[in-house]
Image (spheres, helix red, strand yellow):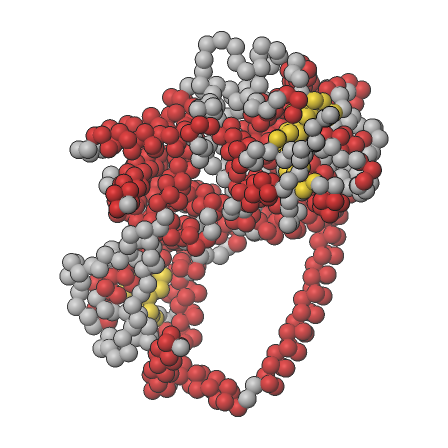
């Protein structure tokens, strides 16, 4: 007679990146379907869509344009929820890819006795490099494409930019940092399908790694982390140079440049040339990708998809359009589209301000009407104290007496 | 910080190793009589450094160079992971990053404490006083010191229709004071970025915008009651004369700190870097208390081996600063204010070529502050254990 089955082990499916591999899409889907997951005994512990991002900032003590102030204690709160959930918990954020070994050790220890399964999603480097530069541009950087490529191809990785790039993109190293204390069977590599694959294939691979039934969820078919073309990226980089010296605060930049211009306006212009790699960098990136495939192929990691997906397709070699020397007429067109988008937004905000002003005036009039004669007398006396020394002395004495009374009350 | 049993499993990074070595050099140079206690304190501090990574962006932990194949090379032709690095070759910027994380950790462990922990609130102005109503405005650090020194003598600003004492320096010095004050309130801004942001907006920090302050007070008290103090040297003597009080004797200081301390650029740089760590580690109120402890630590406890020297306005922004100062001189000259000194002193002189504090100075300050705080934390722990 077999022994009765014990309770399911507490488990964490920990998705740590890498950026630009559909991670936001997965996180949005998980956040929107927390109830569906909970009904299946799976927790996605997040009270806001960026809860795991904040936890990652806390774990890694990372400043992030002021958002880090909302991250204080966020990792421990997340870990507490993991420890308290009796079944499976999913944690996902791509910047966790950058965690150092001490931070990884702290993170894994914080999950208590939960069985940790690591998930890393990966895409070929030839597509990742331009995407990362574009991400840099969308985060206010003004570095040229050539300078970016020079920095990331420096074998010493001396610059902050190169350090960050490799920390979040070097898949074998990320797997080594996060996975070295885990059994190989608990390490899952999800490969991003090559261009032209069925639209839902990436979701099906993620679902397999996260042990979900892909058909229980309805991904938005149009959801994609939008990417810009060559002239659009060149334009945003030029805008950065104009707004970085105090013209736009971080919160305003996020709202107007990243969201309104880059994501909603520039990324919708899909006819412009796409960003690629110059031939010599492409050849180098292809060689690095081959070495990664070799390295990963020699491990017992669980691959969802195919390691061949990480090799650039020789057939997709395109003409290289240099974003440092863009076609100015295309940049001009993009700039006009940006002006129109900003005019529409300015008009919308002006109307909204007019309406708010009218509502405020109505509320103020209502408040005035409700005030009695004693209040109006006091207000006249305070105004007189500004001009008359005797009245001023009397007001100061009154305020001191009132202050003492208030404290003792 | 990692528990000890996990610490042994994590390979040590070159920057962390080198920072421990720098701490050892500083500790040797400042060894006290109790060698045993110092050795114990140092061991705890070294464990702390080796158990954590530098905060924020920067290089990931770089392994030490060893002979033989590196990670990944056994399988692949392209090595993976950050390249190995001799600790002696770790750049100062990386050591500073590691040090700031450690210093923040020590501050959090110590908590706000001592006279610096509480906000040094100003006393209330007496209702009946012979001192005329007055207000002090202008250069942030100079006025904070002046306000505190006067308050120590019972001379507190306030009152109706005040005499307005508007203290000015060269615009570059006023900008540097505004930067220092903002950092002492929690800002993480670098000096070049701070100046660039004001330049980009063609505006000035409120404490440096003398025409705006003078205009605001003129509307309330008239231009004849606005005194511009733009002489060389501290304004305390002239202020005493205007208020009809005896000149400062020099000894009667309460020990309470002014709202902003006169920190060197390297000290301000340490505070701003630690601000960045505290912002993600603790809430704003607690961080403010810890920051006051740190500022007091830097201003009072560490020997001043490096005389404070202002940073220079970056060359590309100097034309803006000069034009802005010129406009300020013209506006103040035509405002009908009472001028003590020469308004030309507001013109920046750009005497300092350095636009950022030397990394070696910042690093030295960090090692001294870490050693001092670690020692005091250990002593506090010992005291608590003895009381139990």
Can see residue A306?
yes
Figure quadrant of the N terminus of chain B: top left
Q: Residue at x 68, y 15 (%)?
A: A297
Q: Is residue A195 left or right of residue A355?
A: right
Residue A121, given in percent of the width and then of the height, sits at 69, 29
Q: Residue at x 52, y 30 (%)?
A: A105
Q: Residue at x 62, y 12 (%)?
A: B76
- As drawn, A238 above or below B257: above
- As drawn, B107 above or below A212: below
Can see residue B323?
no
- As drawn, A115 above or below B174: above
Q: Quadrant of residue A214?
A: top right
Q: Is residue A385 left or right of residue A300?
A: left
Q: Is residue A107 left or right of residue A89?
A: left
Q: Quadrant of residue A350?
A: bottom right
Residue A253, given in percent of the width and then of the height, sits at 61, 49
């Amino acid at each position: 007679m077999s022994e009765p089955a014990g309770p399911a082990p507490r488990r964490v499916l920990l998705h740590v990146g890498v950026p630009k591999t559909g991670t936001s899409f997965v996180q949005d889907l998980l956040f929107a379907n927390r109830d569906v997951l909970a009904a299946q005994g799976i927790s996605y512990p997040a009270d806001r869509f960026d809860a795991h991002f904040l936890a990652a900032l806390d774990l890694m003590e990372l400043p992030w344009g002021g958002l880090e102030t909302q991250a204080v204690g966020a990792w421990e709160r997340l870990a507490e929820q993991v420890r308290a959930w009796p079944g499976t918990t999913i944690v996902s954020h791509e910047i966790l890819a950058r965690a150092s070994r001490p931070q990884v050790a702290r993170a894994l220890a914080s999950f208590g006795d939960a069985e940790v399964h690591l998930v890393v999603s990966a895409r070929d480097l030839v597509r990742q490099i331009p995407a990362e530069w574009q991400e840099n541009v969308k985060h206010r950087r003004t570095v040229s494409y050539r300078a970016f490529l020079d920095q990331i191809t420096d074998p010493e990785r001396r610059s902050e930019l190169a350090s960050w790039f490799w920390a979040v993109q070097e898949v074998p190293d990320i797997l080594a940092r996060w996975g070295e204390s885990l059994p190989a069977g608990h390490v899952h590599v999800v490969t991003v399908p090559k261009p032209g694959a069925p639209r839902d294939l990436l979701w099906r691979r993620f679902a397999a790694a996260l042990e979900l039934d892909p058909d229980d969820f309805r991904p938005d078919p149009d959801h994609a982390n939008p990417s810009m073309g060559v002239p659009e990226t060149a334009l945003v980089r030029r805008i950065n140079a104009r707004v970085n010296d105090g013209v736009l605060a971080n919160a305003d930049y996020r709202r107007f440049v990243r969201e309104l211009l880059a994501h909603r306006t520039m990324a919708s212009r899909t006819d412009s040339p796409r960003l690629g790699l110059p031939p010599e960098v492409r050849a180098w990136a292809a060689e690095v990708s081959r070495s990664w495939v070799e390295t990963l192929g020699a491990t017992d990691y669980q691959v969802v998809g195919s390691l061949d997906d990480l090799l650039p397709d020789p057939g997709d070699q395109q003409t290289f359009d240099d974003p440092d020397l863009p076609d100015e007429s295309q940049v001009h067109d993009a700039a006009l589209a940006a002006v129109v988008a900003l005019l529409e937004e300015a008009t919308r905000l002006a109307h909204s301000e007019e309406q708010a002003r009218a509502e405020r005036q109505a509320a103020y009039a209502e408040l005035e009407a409700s005030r009695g004669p004693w209040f109006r007398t006091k207000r006249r006396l305070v105004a007189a104290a500004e001009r008359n020394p005797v009245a001023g002395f009397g007001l100061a004495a009154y305020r001191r007496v009132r202050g003492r009374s208030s404290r003792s009350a | 910080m990692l528990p000890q049993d996990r610490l042994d499993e994590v390979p040590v990074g070159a920057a962390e190793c080198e920072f421990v070595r720098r701490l050892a050099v500083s500790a040797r140079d400042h060894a006290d009589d109790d060698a045993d206690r110092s050795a114990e304190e140092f061991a705890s501090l070294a464990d702390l450094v080796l158990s954590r990574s530098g905060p924020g962006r920067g290089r990931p932990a770089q392994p030490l160079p060893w002979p033989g194949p590196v990670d990944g090379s056994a399988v692949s032709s392209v090595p993976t992971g950050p390249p190995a690095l001799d600790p002696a070759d770790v750049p100062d910027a990386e050591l500073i990053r590691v040090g700031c994380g450690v210093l923040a950790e020590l501050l959090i462990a110590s908590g706000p404490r001592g006279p610096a922990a509480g906000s040094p609130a100003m006393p209330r102005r007496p209702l009946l006083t012979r001192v005329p109503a007055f207000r002090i405005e202008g250069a942030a650090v100079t006025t904070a010191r002046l306000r505190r020194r006067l308050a120590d003598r019972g001379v507190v600003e306030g009152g109706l229709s005040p005499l307005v004492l508007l203290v000015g320096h060269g615009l570059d010095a006023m900008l540097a004071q505004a930067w220092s004050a903002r950092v002492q309130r929690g800002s993480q801004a670098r000096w070049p970025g701070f100046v660039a942001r004001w330049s980009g907006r063609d505006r000035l920090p409120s404490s440096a915008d003398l025409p705006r302050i003078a205009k605001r007070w003129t509307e309330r008290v008239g231009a004849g009651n606005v005194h511009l103090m733009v002489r060389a040297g501290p304004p305390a003597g002239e202020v005493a004369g205007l208020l009809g009080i005896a000149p400062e004797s020099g000894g009667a200081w309460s020990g309470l700190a002014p709202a902003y301390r006169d920190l060197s650029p390297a000290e301000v740089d340490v505070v701003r870097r630690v601000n960045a760590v505290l912002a993600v580690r603790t809430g704003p109120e607690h961080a403010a208390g810890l920051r006051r402890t740190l500022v007091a630590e830097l201003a009072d406890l560490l020997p001043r081996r490096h005389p404070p020297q202002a940073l220079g306005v970056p060359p590309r922004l100097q034309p803006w600063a000069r034009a802005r100062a010129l406009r300020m001189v013209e506006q103040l000259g035509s405002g009908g204010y009472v001028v003590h000194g020469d308004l030309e002193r507001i013109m920046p002189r750009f005497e300092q070529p350095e636009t950022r504090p030397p990394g070696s100075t910042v690093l030295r300050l960090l090692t001294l502050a870490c050693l001092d705080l670690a020692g005091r934390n250990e002593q506090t722990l010992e005291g608590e254990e003895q009381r139990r």
